[in-house]
Amino acid sequence: MVTLKQLAKELNVSISTVSKALNNSEEIGEDTVKRVKELAELYNYKPNKVALSLKNNKTKTIGVIIPNILNRFLAKVLFGIEREATKHGYNIITCISNESLEKEKESLQLLANGSVDGFILSVAEESQVNNEVEHFKRTIKQGLPIVMFDRVAHDVMCDKVIVDDFDATYNATKSLIEEGRKHIVFVSNINDISVGKLRERGYNKAILENGSIEPAVLKIKKKDDHQKKIKTFFKKNKSVDAIIAADSSSGVIALNTALSFGLKVPKDISVIGFASKSDSNHTLPKLTTIRQHAKVIGAQAAELLIKRIQNTGVEEDVKTKIVKTSLVKNNSTL
Amino acid sequence: MVTLKQLAKELNVSISTVSKALNNSEEIGEDTVKRVKELAELYNYKPNKVALSLKNNKTKTIGVIIPNILNRFLAKVLFGIEREATKHGYNIITCISNESLEKEKESLQLLANGSVDGFILSVAEESQVNNEVEHFKRTIKQGLPIVMFDRVAHDVMCDKVIVDDFDATYNATKSLIEEGRKHIVFVSNINDISVGKLRERGYNKAILENGSIEPAVLKIKKKDDHQKKIKTFFKKNKSVDAIIAADSSSGVIALNTALSFGLKVPKDISVIGFASKSDSNHTLPKLTTIRQHAKVIGAQAAELLIKRIQNTGVEEDVKTKIVKTSLVKNNSTL
DNA sequence: GTGAAAGCGCTAACAA
DNA sequence: TTGTTAGCGCTTTCAC
């Protein structure tokens, strides 16, 4: 990499002259500016990012801490973040907490050494289970803003972007009731995290409001054999006529399992799942899905963080944005 | 963030004393070291990363350019990279090229301003189609090493980590032939990229070697309706008794489509797909899959890059590592 | 119109 | 044992 120093030497001018010329300062003579720019072009000069960061005490970099990159939703949010960040000239450093509190703490610590201007994160499962939030508060106190998305810690004062999980399952369940379904089962393998609980509550509310339907919940643990668990449940509960799944896999698996038992979808049984478009391609008929607009969530989180970074000093109230889900009716419901 | 300066002031010693004390220099007196360390602890002092980067001309950061984060395989590789990088004290800056040559160039340019010590990347589709490699060569000439994985540019001299794509489909096809299948179809929606072509060649070789089977290839374009295309093909070709899919979706969709036509899997038709464990859960029976060991690929790429970064000066030959796939037999084959 | 110098935070050679 | 100084690459104030 060429430096100002080298350009200055070759041009027989001072470093500051070169710097000013490249920054279009009025102070510098026209022809000097021209000479400097030509040489800079020739050598493909780019201001050293590290030096600028040190000088400005701003890295133009965002730390993103994701619990699990193999989760389609989270990957999609990351995509949204990256795109929005790039648009504003920010880079993202990605850490994967792997749902571990320890790794989450470490990543936060490690990047809080001047590597980033702020954080976007979704809380790790372990942190949520243990209700551990001190590390977030410490980071914020250090002057590094945090924006949380999806799985947020309500006790932490910071900007947040969330999904209307409660309403999503509430409405989806109601639509199943309106179809005339009598035995609607809620299936989830995310019972321990905040959003999973919200989704269950939305389902419960719709069921209770109706009054004539018994709530039925099938909880699947991480270590369970997903397919087997659902199969067993179907065998024991022949009268099930609707499934609402809280996560992306359970919906697909439930639908395929129903088919394998000879049930007609959606004639005999309806299935709704939280999933993305390509997941809904993994079933035949295509799965009716609750879309979370992950990219929008990512973009909004990035926008919030960048605004806050650029407004340091100005004490602004923390904001919580809600990105509404939409129910996309495909052919696994009536 | 506390700085050495502030610590020095509060302790009434010089900055360098503080620095040396914290770095366990022999020069500094025992009790001074103790005093310094205590205060540093109290203020949670962390050396400023940016200053260190500037000083050492090393950022301990790797630039990762991924064509598409929603691709499970690529996401998994990213996971592997992150883990290995973290182990060695490196951070990763992630850029998503979105299969676009322009974005790939930009990312490379942007990060080559001192932001990273080197790159790990998989070539964007557009770059492969246009056989554009100049931007890679330029970056390497600038002194920034590149490690390519999966989709690599053979004309570029750099370390590479690839999959034995050819052998994978060759062997998988042979295993279908051994099952006694007579009408084996190769389905792919990645015809334009290097790995897609290699996989097709592997299939072709196995078919041609056999002699008595006609090769049959179904190519799906990005914009096609994936399900519809496969359905139509099945309708026209009733005698198909085996499918080998080059990508992760096609296998799942083909299997579910076969079932929907009343075919028994694997009795009437066998299906093999490139896919991960959780994808194979999306079918019933579970899909027999070619596993690519994405995490291993990521880890190896990171290892190669870090070694090269730390050995600058030592001219070493470029290496190409091949990570062998494995055929995991589930219940969609005999 | 151009240059010298300070400073961002850190390390390390050298001086005391 | 401790301190001074220079320098990493850059911007910017101030002096010429």
Image (tube, coloured by chain):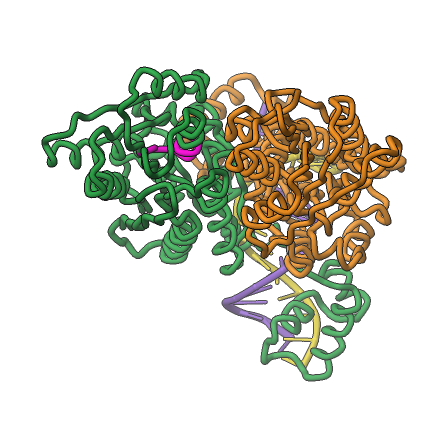
Chain colours: A orange, B green, C purple, D yellow
The N terminus of chain B - image quarter: bottom right
* Of the pair B52 and A6, the residue shown nearer to us: B52
Q: Image quadrant of residue B180?
A: top left
**Eyeballing the image, is B71 above or below B82?**
above
The C terminus of chain B - image quarter: top left
For the point 61% across and 20% down, the residue is A330
**Eyeballing the image, is A61 above or below B36?**
above
Magenta-drawn segment: B244-252
Is B20 left or right of B11, judged from the image as shown?
A: left
Is B111 left or right of B264, judged from the image as shown?
A: right
Residue A179 position within the rendered picture, expressed as x and y whole percent measured from the top left: 73, 22
Residue B127 among magenta residues: no
Residue B231 position within the rendered picture, expressed as x and y whole percent measured from the top left: 40, 19
Residue B242 position within the rendered picture, expressed as x and y whole percent measured from the top left: 29, 33
Residue B90 position within the rendered picture, expressed as x and y whole percent measured from the top left: 52, 54
For the point 12% across and 35% down, the residue is B210
Say whether residue A39 is visible.
no
Is B25 left or right of B258, judged from the image as shown?
A: right
**Eyeballing the image, is B58 above or below B229?**
below
* Of the pair B304 and A185, the residue shown nearer to us: A185
Furthest-bottom residue in this view: B30
Say whether residue A181 is visible.
yes
